Amino acid sequence: MSLWPSFRGRWKLGRKDSTGGSSQLPKQDYEALQERCLRDSCLFEDDSFPATLSSIGSGPLLRKLPRRLQWRRPPELHSNPQFYSAKGKRLDLCQGVVGDCWFLAALQALTLHRDILSQVVPLNQSFTEKYAGIFQFWFWHFGKWVPVVIDDRLPVNEAGQLVFVSSTYKNLFWGALLEKAYAKLSGSYEDLQLGQVSEALVDFTGGVTVTINLAEVPGNLWDILTRATYSRTLIGCQTHSGKERVLENGLVGGHAYTLTGIRKVTWKHGPEYLVKLRNPWGKVEWKGDWSDSSSTWELLSPKEKILLLRKDDGEFWMTLQDFKAHFMLLVICKLTPGLLSQEVGQKWAYTMREGRWEKGTTAGGRMKSSRDTFWKNPQFLLSVWRPQEGKKLQMPCRVLVSLLQKPRHRHRNQKLHFAIGFYVFRDYEDQRRLPRGFFWKNAPVSWPKEFLTEKEVSQELWLEPGTYLIVPCTSEARQESEFVLRVLSRKHVFYEIGSNSSAVFSKETGDQNRGQDELFTKLFEKHPETNAAQRQKIPNHLTSSIADDDSTLLRRLEPCLPSLRTLHMAPEWSLADTNPCPTHLLFFRTMCPAITSSAGKISLLQISPLDGQCAKRKVKIALDLLRLALLLVATTLSQQRCNLTRPKQSDSRVGVLTSIQYSLHSYPT
C-alpha cells in the first residue's frame, strides 16, 4: 500500500485520526487485571479489542489475509517464547501484510536507543513470571503519555506464522504485540495502512519533528545529519511517492526507511560521504554504488571495509548524493527534555500549551482569507533569549514550534484533519490580546507556506532574542478542534494571552524551581492582561495568600534598596546579590524575560534594537523593575489593602516601602 494516496508534491508531517485521543480507549488497570487473572488462573481476553475481524478492520486489508486466519498466543506458537531479548540484533523486526512501513521505520529508529525504547515498551514483561496473557505499552498521545492494554492473541496463518509484524528470531514477540497495541490506539490494523514516519516518531517519543524536503535541501545536509546523529535524535526518511513496488535500483517506491548511521570515508577519488539505511521489510536493498555487491568496496582499506560491512539484514550504504536523488523526505525527531535529550554542550528547554478553536469565538481562520476574524484566534506570547554567553546574546536563537490538532474520529483513517498552520509576529511588548487593527498593519516574520491537513505541522525558526506573538489557526474560520502548541529552544517563557492561565516556564527552568510558581499561577489568573503601566495597580488586589511571610520577604528586600536607588547609574542589577527566593527571581524573569539572565542579572545593556528609543526604553524598564520590587513588598500585607499614600509610621514595613517609593519618585526621567 502506498504511503501517499494523493501526494501531489506535498510532504506529510504525520497523520493520526483517533478521536478524542485517549479518551476513547477503555480505562483498563493493567496491574489489577493481571492480578485478577492470576488469582482466577485464567488468561486475559480484551473485549475492547477482541480476537475477531472487527479488530483487523473492514477495508482492503481483509483481502490480504490468509483464508483461514487464526488467533494464537505466543506460548502456542513457540516452545520458548520471549518478550524481548537484549542479546538479539537491534533491527530484528520485519513487516507483515499491513502497509505500515512508516510505523516500522520509526520503531527501528527507536531500537537504536534502548533507554527510550523502554519508555514505550516496558521490558520487564515476560511469558514466565506473572504471565497472564496481558501486556501494556505506552504512547505519547495528544500531549500525554497514555497506557494501552492488550491481550497476547495474535493473528497467524494455518502454519502458525504471524501475519503482521514478526521478528527474525521466531521466539521474540515484543514487536508483534507493540503493533497490536498501536492498532488498538488507532482503531484497527486497517487504520495502520497509511501514515508517515514523523507521526509514529512523535507517538513513540513525544518529540518535535522537523521534515526536510531533500529537493530543496541546503548545501549543509551533511552537517545537519552529523548533528542529528550525535545528539540522540531519531531519523527516518521516505522515497518518492508512487505505488509501493521494488524499483530496478533495489529501492522501494512510496516507502519509509530508517537512517541508522553515517560515515565519511576516503578512497582514491577523495572523501566520500555515506549514509546507512534500513528497509523495514528486513530484505530488498539498494543495488547501486556502495551496495553489498558493489566494486567500490575494493577501493577501501581492509580494516574500514570490514567495519562498514558489519550490518544487519535489510541495511545498506549509499552516497549522500544518491540519497538526495532517490529520497524525498528526511524526518528528524528532536527529543524533549523528558527523555533526557541533549545536544553536545547544549541544554534544551520545552513547554507545551493546550488550546481550542471554537465557532464564533476563537476559530478565526487564516490571515489571508479571514482578515476580519483572524484576530479572534488564540494568541500566545513567546519570549526567547540566550543563556549568558557574552557577545552571543543578540545572535538568533534556534526555536522549534510544533502545532498538533486533536484527532476527529476514533479510527485514524476515517476522517481527515483540518488544514492548520501558525503565524509568528515580532516585537510584541504588551500583555493583552491584540485587536484586529494590529494584524492589518503588521506583517508576520513567519507564516505557513501551505496549510496542511495533518495531525502535526512544525517549523524550525531562527529568532533574535525578544518577544513574539504566535497565532495558531485553521485554514478556514468556524472550524472547531482542540490543539497542542509546543516550543523547544535554549531558553524561553511561553503562555496564552488573555486566558485564565499562568506563564509556562521551560521545563529545564521549571524543574529547578519546582513548587515555586504558585504565586504566578494565581497572579496571571487574576490579572491575565496586565501591561507595564498597570502593574503598579496590582498590589491593591492581592492578599497574603499568595505571598511569603512578611518578615522573611522584608529581610530579603532590605539589602536591595541601595541597588534600587542607584539603578539608573549601573548597566546591570543583580538579584543574586540580594539572595532572593526562587519565586521572586522567577517573577522577574516572567515580567521582563528578555533582559533577565539565569543568574538573576537584569541587564539594561541588553535592550534591542539599539536605536534612538534605547534610552527611553531603559528608563521605562528600570521604572518597571522598581514597581515590581514594590509589588513584592505589597503582596506581603496581611489581609489588608496597601495604602501607599498614607502609610502608618508604626508599621514595621514603612521603612522599606518608603525607600522604594522614594526611588520611584527620584528616578531621573
Image: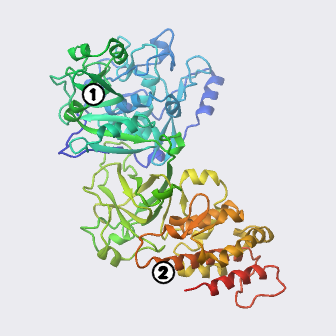
- Using the numbered discs, state the Cα–Cα distance from disc 1 to disc 2 in whole angstroms: 56 Å
Q: Quadrant of residue 313?
A: top left
Q: Which residue is the site of mark 1?
A: 271
**Measured from the top left, where is residue 451 in percent x and y?**
27, 56
Residue 53 located left or right of residue 511: left
**Measured from the top left, where is residue 294 in percent x and y?**
21, 16
Disc 1 residue type? Answer: Pro
Mark 1 surroundings within 10 Å by alpha-carbon count, few (fewer than 14), some (14 through 19), many (20 or more): few
Asked if residue 521 shows in the view, the reply is no
Residue 424 located left or right of residue 537: left
Mark 2 surroundings within 10 Å by alpha-carbon count, few (fewer than 14), some (14 through 19), many (20 or more): few
Give the residue displayed 47% in from the left and 13% down from the top: 76
**Measured from the top left, where is residue 609 in percent x and y?**
41, 70
Residue closer to the observer: 464 or 131: 464
Q: Which residue is the site of mark 2?
A: 616
Question: In the picture shown, does residue 548 fall above or below 613?
Answer: above
Badge 1 marks a residue whose secondary structure is strand
Q: Nearer the viewer, mark 1 or mark 2?
A: 1
Disc 2 residue type? Answer: Lys
Give the residue displayed 82% in from the left and 87% down from the top: 649
Question: In the picture shown, does residue 541 fall above or below 118?
Answer: below
Badge 2 marks a residue whose secondary structure is helix
The quarter of the picture where the C terminus appears is bottom right
Q: Quadrant of residue 189?
A: top left
Residue 566 located left or right of residue 531: right
